[in-house]
Amino acid sequence: MNPALKWLSDSYETMLLELTEYLSIPSISTDPLHANDVVLCAEWIEAHLKKIGMPLVEIHPTDRHPIVYAEFTGAGPKKPTLLLYGHYDVQPVDPIELWTTDPFKAIVRDDKIFARGATDDKGQFFAHIKALESIIATSGSLPLNIKIIIEGEEEIGSPNLFSFVRANAEKLSADAVAVSDSSMIGPGKPSILTGLRGLCYLQVTVVGPNRDLHSGSYGGPVVNPLNALCSIVASLKDSSGRIAVTGFYDDVTDATQEERESFEKLGYSPEVLMKDINVGALNGEAGYSPLEQLWIRPSLDLNGILGGFTGEGAKTVLPSHAMAKISMRLVPHQRHDDVVEKVREFIHTAAAPGVSVTVTDLHGANPVLVPVNSVAVQSASKALEETFGVPCVFHREGGSIPVVELFDSVLNIPTVLMGFGLKTENLHSPNEHFHLENFRRGMQSAVRFYHHYAKASTL
Amino acid sequence: MNPALKWLSDSYETMLLELTEYLSIPSISTDPLHANDVVLCAEWIEAHLKKIGMPLVEIHPTDRHPIVYAEFTGAGPKKPTLLLYGHYDVQPVDPIELWTTDPFKAIVRDDKIFARGATDDKGQFFAHIKALESIIATSGSLPLNIKIIIEGEEEIGSPNLFSFVRANAEKLSADAVAVSDSSMIGPGKPSILTGLRGLCYLQVTVVGPNRDLHSGSYGGPVVNPLNALCSIVASLKDSSGRIAVTGFYDDVTDATQEERESFEKLGYSPEVLMKDINVGALNGEAGYSPLEQLWIRPSLDLNGILGGFTGEGAKTVLPSHAMAKISMRLVPHQRHDDVVEKVREFIHTAAAPGVSVTVTDLHGANPVLVPVNSVAVQSASKALEETFGVPCVFHREGGSIPVVELFDSVLNIPTVLMGFGLKTENLHSPNEHFHLENFRRGMQSAVRFYHHYAKASTL
């Protein structure tokens, strides 16, 4: 047996106490009243990384909450460098009355640890720290070079991380980055996320008459901005559920037949989804399963719409303007900037005469695809399979994780998204918890991953 | 010269003083602080109708503001009975700071009288009262039977008038009703309104998932209620601007070629409309001029729409529900109830699977068409032409005037809509006024109208 794994087993009670201490710091990044707790938490992590034997640990102040950085380069230039990313800040605890125990006094029940941050992301990231400690404690060194970046602003959109990474690209240079801040595809099913959709979020404003008009005295010849907006929105998709914007699919790379077949084996049930959200039917793009519609196909959704009289009762107004927020999820290899221009042109062409239309780009992210065959992903997959006793599944996700695109575009390295959480663990909700079985397996997987990666990618 | 017309000329200074007194009563029906002023105004009218010689004058209390009723039946059963309708209540005066003079101290400037209620409707109705007085004063009687109903709730939607008319249909029975509470088609252009559009006002609610969802994690297979609503709305009209609801035009009676040709002679300018509301194009139903689209064709307008996230910035939500207020203007001989059912069925058929749709009937009115060839309308037309020296124009209006449908459906009599106001006289706005030239011509027209109608329709 690997001495590090034995060490993890022997030291389990101690590390639970340490995790409990870490979880007791209310590092709520969005709440100014907790700003000092966020600093205390950064200092706790700094001290802990020093304690486990990381030779360099730094705190980098930002405009808001500090970033903790650590590195070990003792494996030498012939060994790969793995960057580990995590966050030590947590979500607020409201509604506090729905918690059955104090969110900042961790408690273990049924082999789960309950506390704010247990799974998102203190507990998951702590598994990596303990894995590093176990190897250092039992061998005096690490088999590869390690860099650690752990931020305190993930729950508020990482406002300072991007500029920090761009300004320190040289310092952070690595061969791969590992992130454990997501969910496994199901209990006992180790998985690696290999694809994330991008985002193109637009606001469309339609302006017609210079004032609200009486719908009786003006209704007929005057183009109504609300009707015009609805027609624009309706024209964005065709009857088969495909997005009708000219050239929209030009850069979409189809998933391989192999990948699509692998989805079928996941046992995903549209009926479970329908029951959960209480709808009688799904109706996505023709020719693709619901899971494929979520993971490998673009989507287009209205996120909000507003115009005219929306109070109780009837007001016979022909409103002067209307607004909609429209977003598209993008898939490889669509580019956010390119899609904005295509949609903008389509909307302007689709707009009725007699109204003026403005399309504003509010937010965007490019889709990310992590090559399944990269050495880092293969090493992680092997480690997960050995630990969980079942093959690792490669899956995708319909949403976006902006840091992945950041590491891809700035550091030009693949991200291994090896989550140890479960979707049922109440992230961002009362009674957040983390299955300790997955904490233990996470630590073991990390130990194996570092070794496999060091061995497989010796330069 | 008709002695009544001479009397009107000789008594002009006196009647201006009387009108000034009438306009000084702040009978603002919507404001509870002015409830007593509304009563005082009803009593002023009651006293004035007695003073001019009306043999029966009554005040009928209602749940809110009283209705004044008067009648003269001395012309006997062989003469026609004309009902006169008007209102003595007025709009509020806000924003008071934009008035150049006190809204309740009438002042004459440039042959216009400035005061709240000057044109809407105290001044216009007062022309009828003075016309009646001039005939009684010079002949001791009236050439026809007259009934007067003047309410104090027109500006708050006449909540008690409808039940009063229904309950007193026998008492109010007449051969025609005359209303002077609208605008002429232009200065020096006498006109009679012969058609009003009806209304069908619906609220459409679309419900999808049981909660707001993350647009990344769910966008694709899940039907978005906002997109579904926009598709429903867009499907309601075709590309030629026609309403696509099955059977919608079944009961539409085309205007006669003669009437359409008469519209062309009115000199209506779409360019003036476009400039006024600052739009670059109009885009109504193909095959009809803008004026025809307003007056003789149905229209469909969104009055309001709301759903999802409508604040600043971007929120990646797939909302659970959305709502739109949709109204149609109806033309003869569409029926409100029938249209509701047709639209409801069309919307349910147009709705995407995976959402549930509710259509609520909020408000409705049937369209009204006053036959141009009725004796009353022809008599009024003749009187207006003699008074103004130019032919009277028959026109329509895109909006609805509910009392007209009331008199049509309950009393089964035609309404002669002979307005003496002008659209430019700031109804409902600061500095409301009434052109005294039209006050004088209104009185003269009324005198001539009563005589022509009495003569033409002797039973």
Image (cartoon, coloured by chain):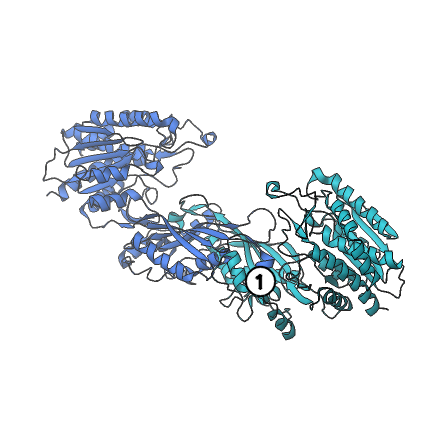
Chain colours: A blue, B cyan
Answer whether residue B144 is visible to the viewer in this image.
yes
At x 51% / y 49%, what residue is drawn? B306
**Is residue B15 shown above or below A111?**
below
Q: Is residue B117 left or right of residue B69?
A: left
- In front here: B100 or A84? B100
Residue A81 quadrant: top left
At x 75% / y 65%, what residue is drawn? B383
**Is residue B212 shown above or below A51?**
below
Instruction: Identify the image quadrant of the C terminus of chain A.
Output: top left
- In front here: A302 or A320? A320
Q: Which residue is mark 1?
A: B299
Mark 1 element type? strand
Residue B391 quadrant: bottom right
Residue B405 quadrant: bottom right
Task: From the top left corner, tell me how far across and down residue B64 is, in percent.
Answer: 75, 43
Instruction: Identify the image quadrant of the N terminus of chain A.
Output: top left
Task: From the top left corner, tell me how far across and down residue A351 is, in percent.
Answer: 43, 60
Q: Is residue A171 left or right of residue B250?
A: left
Task: From the top left corner, tell me how far across and down residue A359 is, in percent.
Answer: 39, 53
- In front here: A374 or A224? A224
Q: Residues within 10 Å of mark 1 (few under 14, many from 20)?
A: many
Q: Is residue B135 left or right of residue A18?
A: right
Task: From the top left corner, tell me how far across and down residue B172 is, in percent.
Answer: 82, 57
Answer whether residue B333 is visible to the viewer in this image.
no
Residue type at mark 1: give it: Ser
Q: Chain of mark 1?
A: B
At x 26% / y 34%, what residue is drawn? A150
